[in-house]
Image (cartoon, grey):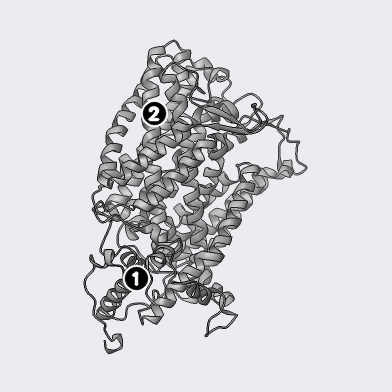
């Protein structure tokens, strides 16, 4: 039975097909679901099978290749230099670190650089719109890929909402109004403090406008971003130069916030990481690059390099301009120029911030939409989400889903409530991508020996385990040196931390865990054979860079607050439930349809060029039996595949 419009949109031809794929079928009886789940959890796919699925889900409509590495770098700068620099430094400096905030940004940049190198190799050798989802699916299996992509999409939606939420305060300052002028309180019981929401209509409007721009076409969106980003960079340079003319080195003392410690600087680094999300979204544009093998690595690494320099200089400028107690957490840099008497400059800064927030939201929606479309093509989400406009060649359905979800959350939720959740999600994704790269290089189906697979697993687990051990020794209360008080990202004072009973042994265990992590990496280099040598960009210093990425990301994850992890845990439980109810069943139904059509299995390798061409044509005819769609496809005659 060929799927109609409903089947193409949701992935099933009928309710009967869903039941056969999940609860009961003739082959497995009522054991069909557990057997199906066993097959699917660790199921991997090759690049060829993913490309075939992409062609089948999009018909003859492909993403248009219009971008080069300069466009990619500008996209990265546009996204990362949004609220990441105009809002977060003030919050981290006031609530966590003091003037040492720039060191927190340097530490966060280390994680970003390590991850960007891992992404660079994947994007050059697996140029797919799904980005981290495809990398994980190809190496660690379907279930891990589902967890990764669901958290990645959520993180981008929350990040877009947080960035958009920063627009109204700067707009208010531009018109000489209080920062909360455009924020309206909607009280459920009549007054603040008794339940309600701070409504930000501008945040919703920004997401709506950017969704419209992205729906007009990729090159048009990039042109808008490039113009705005150039102006934005000029204004950031103005902030640095003009701000340093009002620098006072006395404001650097005390260097770390009173009552805090160097541990707070590392905590600040985990929160500053919010400012670096965005370069991974660049990986989702791989199918729109003219030459992904060379342009993707240059664009990604170039973008991270540019924003790191800008971030550090702007943090130093802020701390030298304004005493810690006078730094504002909303519209930070505009308020700083107001403080030093350069009132006229706050208007320039506000314009720069508004432009940065606008482009940050634009690129955030763009990246998440392409990741969502890539997953829908693989039937992890309803395939109708991957619909591409034949005229404009953009994934318009996923764009509007991401844009409106971001706008809806931004309408009600404040910046601080979202930032740590975003950091957890993105750091987890970067962690898994680093692990995936180890598997990508050293585990090739049909080539890698069982011995090498065992060595790969043992060494990877050792690197992960010792990294976790180092982090636990750093954060567990029994090792604590004691702190008078602690302030979280929201500025909330938490109870004092007493001196732990094992505090005197902490440094010994930290050294031990660190040395064992290095030893595991060296052993990996010696004993684990690399069966896959990339043809395109090849990561230098393998496996040291992915191992270092695992270590640093684990450490930063350990610095985030428990409340954010509780929310993250509930979200993870919900997406696991969605996978069990829909994701794995939709994939199984799709594979069963391929089997019924006598198509080559996605993972069985090539059965010859003729088989693949016939199978693909039959698959396209099957999945697009709709008058509007079939007109764009070549006519396919019934073919006896067994004769080939």
Q: Is residue 380 shown above or below 270? A: below
Please identify the residue farthest to the top as the structure is shown.
Answer: 341
Q: Is residue 182 shown above or below 57? A: above
Q: Nearer the viewer, residue 590 or 288?
A: 590
Image position, residue 102 (x, y; %): 49, 30
CA distance separating discs 1 and 2: 44 Å
**Residue identifier under label 1:** 623
Please identify the residue farthest to the left as the structure is shown.
Answer: 634
**Residue identifier under label 2:** 354
Q: Is residue 253 visible?
A: yes
- Specify the quadrant that holds the C terminus: bottom left
Image position, residue 599 (x, y; %): 35, 79
Residue 526 shows which numbered tag?
A: none
Q: Nearer the viewer, residue 314 or 15?
A: 15
Image position, residue 38 (x, y; %): 56, 74
Q: Nearer the viewer, residue 41 or 558?
A: 41
């Amino acid at each position: 039975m060929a799927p109609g419009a409903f089947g193409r949109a949701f992935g099933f031809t009928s309710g009967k097909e869903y039941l056969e794929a999940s609860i009961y079928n003739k082959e497995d009886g009522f054991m069909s679901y557990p057997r199906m789940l066993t097959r699917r959890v660790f199921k991997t796919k090759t690049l060829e099978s993913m490309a075939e699925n992409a062609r089948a889900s999009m018909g003859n409509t492909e993403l248009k290749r219009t971008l080069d590495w300069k466009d990619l770098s500008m996209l990265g700068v546009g996204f990362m230099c949004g609220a990441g620099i105009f809002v977060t430094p003030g919050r981290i400096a006031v609530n966590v670190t003091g003037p040492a905030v720039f060191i927190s940004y340097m530490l966060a940049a280390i994680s970003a650089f390590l991850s960007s190198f891992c992404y660079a190799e994947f994007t050059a050798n697996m140029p797919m719109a799904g980005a981290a989802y495809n990398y994980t699916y190809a190496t660690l299996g379907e279930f891990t890929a589902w967890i990764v992509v669901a958290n990645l999409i959520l993180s981008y939606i929350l990040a877009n909402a947080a960035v958009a939420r920063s627009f109204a305060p700067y707009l208010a300052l531009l018109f000489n109004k209080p920062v909360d002028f455009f924020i309206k309180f909607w009280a459920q019981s009549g007054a603040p403090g008794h339940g309600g929401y701070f409504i930000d209509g501008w945040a919703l409007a920004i997401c709506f406008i950017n969704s419209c721009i992205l729906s007009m076409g990729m090159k048009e969106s990039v042109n808008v971003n490039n113009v705005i980003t150039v102006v934005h960079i000029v204004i950031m340079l103005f902030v640095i130069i003009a701000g340093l003319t009002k620098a006072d080195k006395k404001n650097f003392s005390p260097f770390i916030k009173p009552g805090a410690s160097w541990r707070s600087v590392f905590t600040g680094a985990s929160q500053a990481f919010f400012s670096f999300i965005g370069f991974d979204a660049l990986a989702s544009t791989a199918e729109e690059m003219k030459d992904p093998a060379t342009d993707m690595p240059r664009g990604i690494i170039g973008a991270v390099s540019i924003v790191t320099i800008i971030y550090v200089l702007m943090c130093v400028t802020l701390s030298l301009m304004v005493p810690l107690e006078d730094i504002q957490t909303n519209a930070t840099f505009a308020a700083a120029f107001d403080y030093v008497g350069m009132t006229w400059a706050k208007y320039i800064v506000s314009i720069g911030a508004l432009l940065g927030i606008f482009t940050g939201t634009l690129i955030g929606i763009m990246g998440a939409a392409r990741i969502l479309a890539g997953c829908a093509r693989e039937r992890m989400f309803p395939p109708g989400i991957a619909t591409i406009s034949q005229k404009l060649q953009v994934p318009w359905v996923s764009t509007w889903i991401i844009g409106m979800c971001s706008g809806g959350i931004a309408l009600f939720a404040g910046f601080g409530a979202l930032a740590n959740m975003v950091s957890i999600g993105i750091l987890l994704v970067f962690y898994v991508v680093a692990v995936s790269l180890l598997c990508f290089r050293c585990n090739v189906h049909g080539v890698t020996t069982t011995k090498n697979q065992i060595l790969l697993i043992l060494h990877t687990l050792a690197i992960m385990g010792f990294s976790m051990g180092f982090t636990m020794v750093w954060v567990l209360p029994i090792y604590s040196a004691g702190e008078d008080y602690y302030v979280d990202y929201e500025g909330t004072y938490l109870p004092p931390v007493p001196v732990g009973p094992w505090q005197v042994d902490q440094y010994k265990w930290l050294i031990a865990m660190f040395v064992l992590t290095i030893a595991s990496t060296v052993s990996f280099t010696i004993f684990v054979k690399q069966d896959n040598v990339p043809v395109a960009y090849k990561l230098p210093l393998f496996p040291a860079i992915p191992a270092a990425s695992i270590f640093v990301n684990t450490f930063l994850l350990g610095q985030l607050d428990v409340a954010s992890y509780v929310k993250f845990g509930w979200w993870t439980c919900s997406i696991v439930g969605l996978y069990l109810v829909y994701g794995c069943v939709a994939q199984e139904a799709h594979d069963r349809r391929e089997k019924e059509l006598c198509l080559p299995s996605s993972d069985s390798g090539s059965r010859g060029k003729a088989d693949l061409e016939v199978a693909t044509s039959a698959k396209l005819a099957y999945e697009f039996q709709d008058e509007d769609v079939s007109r764009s496809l070549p006519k396919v005659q019934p073919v006896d595949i067994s004769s080939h």
